[in-house]
Amino acid sequence: MHIIFQALLRSYSADKFKDLKAILLERIEQAILSKEYDEERKFLNLLFLLKMIDKNYLHKSASLSFESEADEIDKNREPNTYYPILPDLLQNAFNEINKIRKKELSIYCRIKEKLLKAKKGFVDILSIASAPMIMKLPDSWLMTLLDSVNDVIIKTRSEALVLLLNIPIISKNEVDSYKKSSIPLFDEAVRFNSKGNAVGYGDPQESHRTEAHIYFRQKRVSAILVYKDVIKKYGITFSEKDVYSMLKIRIPKFIVDEDRLLLWAKGITAGFNDDYITASHILMPQLEHGLHNLAEISHGTITKLAEKRQEEPSLGSIFKLLDGGVEEEFKYELESFLQSGIDVNFRNNLLHGLFSSFEIEKYGIYLWWLCLKLYFKLDEFLVNKKLE
């Protein structure tokens, strides 16, 4: 219908359709009563197209429609169940009301609070889904994060990529500050799997450092989610061809075989399209292979050639070989996230099929972002110039 009226408006003025306003308003009321929110928004856009409502009315009404749809889902959802559409709807509501926030401040504040709660919801669900440790992020920090992107404008894929790459890696200063200002949550950390079996232990010093990394990692994930919403808001999309072209511009040293660019392109494209299950299964082996190559650049061949079975070294052995070559806190974050028994242990849980699909989605976004950082910003984390 929208397309039909667009075509008619090329031949007739909007005044010719003024008698339709009452009918369209009635259809909107019917859509609201029957909870057909998509239909409601279609008719709102049609009213705007026919110049029967102004932009402010459209943004306010569309925002309230998205909010009502989210409220309906929230009211009927089952306990301890994650609904991915809920934060998406509230993000849409926020994007609409944000355009007129000075005129509708009370609605803006209400929707912003709901969005904040929804974005924190997945953390609460993860705590039930055997997450290693969950720490509450301050509401004030999350609200500052949302405010910080109000005036961000993204016009190109390059600007979208830069926005994500500008999120900093966890630093030693952050970790040291956290350790000085807090006491360990436990004398020793014990990680249990979903069956109640202890699968990891850490001494107090290690567990406190891991706590700091988990805390600041949650901040990074929140920022990634908010920044990706900004990218979607401006309609920036990434095809595999687009990503491959970006990767070709500057190939990092750990890519020794350009054929692997295709795999990196497929994994990174999947992440840009919010398919973190596919991204994780493609990128995790490529990340491990890249770290293996960095170790070989520094130490020469690390395959055990002298032994009868010439096996490649384990990921744990690779991290030891990267000592002194990669910035220490970055290496600790990679090692802790990928293989620590008291942390996510992403690599082992993913490749051995121990993660639920929900856990892959929720941790996979961070793996995807780590791969972006490692690919495009590798030089920032290298201590050994031989690796550059």
Image (tube, helix red, strand yellow):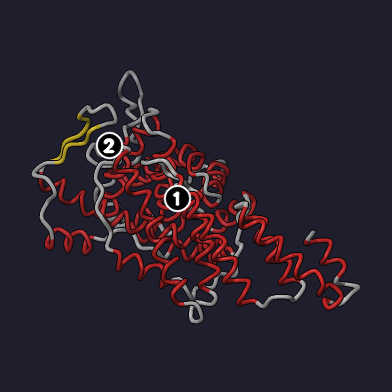
Quadrant of the rendering where the C terminus is positioned = bottom left
What SS does tag 2 mark? helix
Residue 376, horizontal then vertical, whole percent: 46, 57
Looking at the picture, tell me which residue is in the foreground, 66 or 359.
66
Packing grade of label 1 (10 A; few <14, some 14-19, many >=20) is few
Q: For residue 178, what is the image quadrant?
A: bottom left
Q: Position of 180 compared to 346: left or right? A: left
Question: Is any atom of residue 328 visible in this view?
Answer: no
Which residue is under mark 1? 74
- The residue positioned 40% from the left and 51% from the top of the image is 370
- The residue positioned 47% from the left and 71% from the top of the image is 107
- The residue positioned 82% from the left and 72% from the top of the image is 19
Which residue is farthest right?
11
Looking at the picture, tell me which residue is in the foreground, 87 or 13.
13
- The residue positioned 33% from the left and 43% from the top of the image is 126
Residue 321, horizontal then vertical, whole percent: 27, 42
- Alpha-carbon span between mark 2 and mark 1: 43 Å
Under mark 2, the amino acid is Gly
Q: For residue 242, what is the image quadrant?
A: bottom right
Tag in front: 2 or 1: 1
Residue 156, horizontal then vertical, whole percent: 60, 67
Which residue is under mark 2? 316
Q: Position of 207 compared to 344: left or right? A: left
Under mark 1, the amino acid is Asp
Quadrant of the rendering where the N terminus is positioned = bottom right
Looking at the picture, tell me which residue is in the foreground, 32 or 190.
32
Packing grade of label 2 (10 A; few <14, some 14-19, many >=20) is few
Q: In the rendered view, tell whether residue 346 sits above or below residue 216.
A: above
